[in-house]
Image (tube, rainbow, N blue to C red):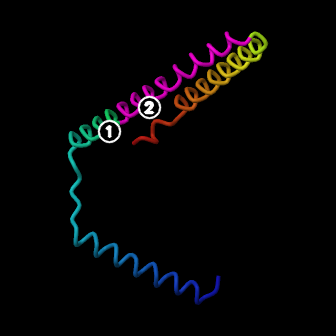
């Protein structure tokens, strides 16, 4: 890094510090009370939970007719029977493995990430 680059960085740093100080002086900061934060967190959790339930409902409303149709197809064709049920068992196994890995990820998340 050259001397000119260092001088430019120092000037830029001083200008940014001055602009930041001006902003802090212009807009005083008043932190909210803990009760307000608790209400906000509760509302956010409620919204997330509602969205997750809606997504789960959409998943099951699509999955049940699909699975029922596949089962009817599996019963209809005798040569297709073994391939169909192999595919079903494989799909369920992969789904269970993905679910378990997601549960482990969620448990291993650091609690400080949400603070």
**What element does badge 2 sit on?**
helix
Q: Tell me the residue at 67%/19% (across/down).
A: 93
On the picture, is 50 further left or further right than 12?
Answer: left
Extreme-bottom residue of the structure: 4
Q: Is residue 62 above or below residue 43?
A: above
Q: Calculate the distance from the C-alpha at mark 1 to the C-alpha at mark 2.
A: 17 Å
* Residue 61 counted in the magenta span: yes
- Image x and y of residue 41, in percent: 30, 38
Rendered image quadrant of residue 53: top left
Residue 87, which numbered label? none
Residue range in magenta is 48-77
Residue 77 lies left or right of residue 14; in this view the side is right
**90 in relation to 23, above or below:** above
Q: Nearer the viewer, residue 68 or 96?
A: 68
Q: Quadrant of the N terminus?
A: bottom right
- What is the x, y in percent for residue 115? 39, 42
Q: Which residue is mark 1?
A: 44
Residue 67: percent from left, percent from top: 58, 19
Query: Which numbered disc, 1 or 2, marks the residue that appears first in the sequence?
Result: 1
* Residue 2 position (above or below residue 91): below
Residue, x 52% and y 86% (percent of image)?
A: 8
Q: Residues within 10 Å of mark 1 (few under 14, many from 20)?
A: few
Which residue appears at 48% of the width and 23% of the height?
60
Picture quarter containing residue 66?
Answer: top right
Which residue is label 2 attached to?
55
- Residue 89 drawn above or below residue 15: above
Callout 1: helix, strand or loop?
helix
Q: Quadrant of residue 89?
A: top right
Magenta stretch prevailing secondary structure:
helix
67 vs 49, nearest the viewer:
67
């Amino acid at each position: 890094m050259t001397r000119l680059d260092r001088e430019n960085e120092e000037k830029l740093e001083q200008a940014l510090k001055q602009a930041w100080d001006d902003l802090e002086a212009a807009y005083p900061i008043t932190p909210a009370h803990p009760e307000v934060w608790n209400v906000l967190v509760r509302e956010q959790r409620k919204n997330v939970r509602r969205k997750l339930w809606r997504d789960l409902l959409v998943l099951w409303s699509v999955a049940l007719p699909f699975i029922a149709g596949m089962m009817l197809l599996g019963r209809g064709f005798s040569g297709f029977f073994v391939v169909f049920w192999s595919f079903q068992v494989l799909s369920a196994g992969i789904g269970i493995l993905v679910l378990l890995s997601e549960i482990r990820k969620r448990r291993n998340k650091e609690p400080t990430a949400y603070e």
